């Protein structure tokens, strides 16, 4: 860290084994550039949910914080470990009594930051109001740290833009949209807050947002509940954003999109059982 500047890396939604491998390989080359690394991991385990093995595997690779979304509950073992997973947060606007936490504080290079997670409500399942929850909590959070990073997991672009501007008016440091798996080209600084509508995804290039084309096509053309399968490919996409923050004020000074490809000679295996992919 130089001149109180923090470098934050945020990976878009990781999908399956190929996404996990790409992230670990990318971090092996680039981890030292960043003070803190965040990953949306709700699709990490075969496209649906996050197993404890994959949580541990990605933690060891260099992930400092895991955000999530509506698929976080898909692997039922999450209920057994979410309360002890110190790097993992789930959307804050699930009802009172839901296991896990909607935000956490982390220490970075002598500074404290807060990472918050919310679900959108437009074209999504009913949730508590993210607007009210954010407004009710941001003042007390800002008394602890000026650095507040938000993952807003939502479908509608307009809702993301509107909620982002709302959060910027309360002094948020960064607002990253997730869920749609397509990286948007609207990165900008709004009222001192880094913003992007969607960070994109990390997974197979030859896919439909990380899933096999054939199963996606069958589901969309027949309207039958075809099971999605994670795409297998030897080219992985890495979508992420790099954010530079002033650690004293909490204001963002820069945001850059990252969009890279990693080519493997064969479909690379990691050290996990196939059913955990």
Image: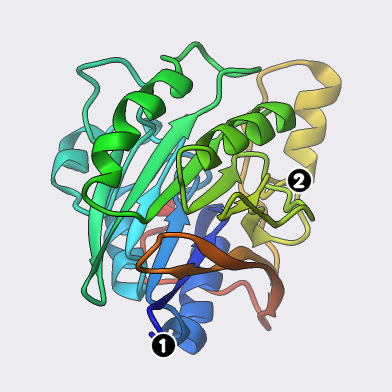
Residue 154, above or below 38: above
> Which element type, helix, strand or loop, lies under badge 2?
loop
**Residue 77 in view, yes or no:** no
x and y percent of residue 32 in the render? 41, 87
Q: Residue at x 46, y 38 (%)?
A: 170
Could you tell me which secondary element the residue under label 1 belongs to?
Answer: loop
Task: Choose between 108 and 270: the one closer to the eye.
Answer: 108
Q: Position of residue 51 (x, y in %)?
A: 32, 47
Residue 97 x %, y %: 20, 18
Q: Which badge, 1 or 2, is on the more N-terminal residue? A: 1
Q: CA distance from mark 1 to mark 2?
A: 40 Å
* Percent position of residue 256, x then y: 66, 69
Horizontally, is 243 left or right of 255 in the view?
left
Q: Quadrant of residue 141?
A: top left
Q: Of the numbered discs in the image, which one, if any, rests on residue 133?
A: none
Residue 18 can be seen, yes or no: yes
| Residue assigned mark 1 | 2
Q: Residue furthest left?
A: 84
Q: Quadrant of residue 31?
A: bottom left
**Could you classify mark 2 by the number of other residues whose Cα lies within 10 Å: few (under 14), some (14-19), or many (20 or more)?**
some
Query: 113 left or right of 184?
Result: left
Residue nearest the observer in this picture, 148 or 263: 148
- Nearer the observer, 99 or 167: 167
Frontmost residue, 260 versus 267 = 260
At horizontal 34% and vertical 54% (from top left) the residue drawn is 146
| Other residues around mark 1 within 10 Å, as few (<14) / some (14–19) / many (≥20) | few
Q: Which mark is residue 208?
A: 2
How many badges with numbers are in the image?
Answer: 2
């Amino acid at each position: 860290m130089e001149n109180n500047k923090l470098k934050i890396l945020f990976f878009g939604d990781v999908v399956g084994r190929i996404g996990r491998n790409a992230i670990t390989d990318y971090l092996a080359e680039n981890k030292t550039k960043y003070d803190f690394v965040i990953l949306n991991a709700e699709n990490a385990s075969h496209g649906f949910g996050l197993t404890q093995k994959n949580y541990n595997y990605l933690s060891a690779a260099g992930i400092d914080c895991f955000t999530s979304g509506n698929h976080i509950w898909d692997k039922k073992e999450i209920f057994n470990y979410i309360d002890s997973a110190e790097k993992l947060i789930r959307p804050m606007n699930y009802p009172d009594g839901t296991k896990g936490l909607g935000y956490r504080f982390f220490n970075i290079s002598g500074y404290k930051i807060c990472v918050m997670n919310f679900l959108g409500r437009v074209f999504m399942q009913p949730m508590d109001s993210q607007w009210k929850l954010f407004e009710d909590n941001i003042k007390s959070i800002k008394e602890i740290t000026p650095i507040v990073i938000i993952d807003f997991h939502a479908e509608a672009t307009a809702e993301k833009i509107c909620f982002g501007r709302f959060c910027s008016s309360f002094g948020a440091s960064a607002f990253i949209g997730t869920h749609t798996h397509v990286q948007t080209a609207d990165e900008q600084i709004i009222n001192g807050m880094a913003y992007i509508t969607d960070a994109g995804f990390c997974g197979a290039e030859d896919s439909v947002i990380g899933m096999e084309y054939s199963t996606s096509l069958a589901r969309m053309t027949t309207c039958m509940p075809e099971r999605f399968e994670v795409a297998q490919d030897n080219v992985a996409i890495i979508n992420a954003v790099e954010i530079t923050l002033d650690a004293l004020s909490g204001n963002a000074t820069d945001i850059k999109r990252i969009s890279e490809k990693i080519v493997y000679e064969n479909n690379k295996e990691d050290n996990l059982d196939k059913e955990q992919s």
